[in-house]
Image (cartoon, rainbow, N blue to C red):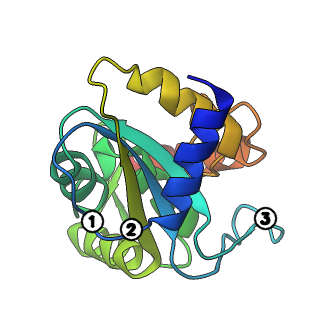
C-alpha cells in the first residue's frame, strides 16, 4: 500500500468518527469526542477532539470486535484498548481490580469504564473493497504514520508506550 493510500485512509478515519455501523472486515479508529488529559501519563498529553487514540482491524464485523469487546463491560481482559484506558484512568475513576488471568475490573467498575468510553470516544472505519487486502500490513502502516497513544504494538514512535505499559503492569500485579 502506498503512503498516499494510508494518508487517504487516515483522513477518512479522522473525519468520520461516528457510532457503530459496518458488518464486513475493516480498519477502525477510536477517537476522542472531547478534549482529554491523561494525567497519569504526563501533564503534557492533551488530546484534542477527533484525535485518534487507537487503530485496530477486524476480520469479523464491528459489532463483534468493537461493540462486544472494546465497548462491552466485563471484556477488559480481551481488549487492549480497555486495559490501557482502565490503567490510565484507574485513579481518576477509582477503578477496582479483580483477579483474573490478565486483569479486569470489578463489575461496577467495568460499567464505569464503559460509560466513560461511551461519553468520551467515537469510532470511524474504513472498509476495504478488496477482500485480499492485507489488513495487518495496512494497520501497521497507519499506526506508524499516526502514532496513536494507545497502540503499543507496531508503534515504535509512541513516546508514552513505556508509561502505559508500567500502568498496565501495575494493574496486572495488583489484581493477583
Of tags 3 and 2, the one toward the viewer is 3
Residue in front for this viewpoint, 40 or 55: 55
Mark earlier in primary sequence (3, 2): 3
Q: Quadrant of the N terminus?
A: top right
Distance CA(mark 2)–CA(mark 1): 6 Å
How many discs mark residues in the rendered view?
A: 3
Task: State whether residue 78 is above or below residue 21.
Answer: above
Q: Which residue is labeled 1 in the image?
A: 106
Is mark 2 in CB contact (under 8 Å) with mark 1?
Answer: yes
**What x and y, as percent, mark residue 8?**
58, 45
> Under tag 2, what secondary structure?
loop
Name the residue: 59% across, 54% down. Answer: 11
Q: Quadrant of residue 124?
A: bottom left
> Under tag 3, what secondary structure?
loop
Specify few, some or many for label 1: CA neighbours under 10 Å numbering under 14, 14-19, or 20 or more: some
**What x and y, as percent, mark residue 73?**
23, 64
Q: Which residue is labeled 3 in the image?
A: 42
Would residue 154 be found to the left or right of residue 132 on screen?
A: right
Would residue 8 be found to the left or right of residue 24 on screen?
A: right
Would residue 15 be found to the left or right of residue 73 on screen?
A: right
Specify few, some or many for label 3: CA neighbours under 10 Å numbering under 14, 14-19, or 20 or more: few
Residue 96 numbered mark, or none: 2
Amino acid at each position: 500500500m502506498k503512503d498516499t493510500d494510508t494518508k487517504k485512509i487516515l483522513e477518512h478515519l479522522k473525519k468520520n468518527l461516528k457510532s457503530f455501523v459496518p458488518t464486513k472486515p475493516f480498519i477502525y479508529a477510536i477517537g476522542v469526542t472531547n478534549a482529554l488529559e491523561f494525567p497519569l501519563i504526563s501533564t503534557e498529553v492533551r488530546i484534542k477532539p477527533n484525535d485518534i487514540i487507537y487503530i485496530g482491524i477486524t476480520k469479523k464485523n464491528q459489532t463483534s470486535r468493537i461493540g462486544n469487546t472494546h465497548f462491552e463491560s466485563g471484556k477488559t481482559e480481551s481488549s487492549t484498548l480497555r486495559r490501557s484506558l482502565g490503567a490510565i484512568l484507574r485513579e481518576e475513576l477509582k477503578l477496582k481490580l479483580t483477579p483474573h488471568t490478565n486483569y479486569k475490573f470489578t463489575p461496577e467498575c467495568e460499567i464505569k469504564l464503559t460509560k466513560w468510553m461511551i461519553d468520551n470516544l467515537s469510532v470511524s472505519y474504513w472498509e476495504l473493497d478488496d477482500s485480499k487486502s492485507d489488513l495487518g500490513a495496512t494497520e501497521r502502516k497507519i499506526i506508524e504514520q499516526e502514532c496513536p497513544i494507545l497502540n503499543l504494538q507496531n508503534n515504535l514512535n509512541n513516546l508514552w508506550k513505556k508509561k502505559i505499559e508500567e500502568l498496565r503492569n501495575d494493574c496486572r500485579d495488583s489484581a493477583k
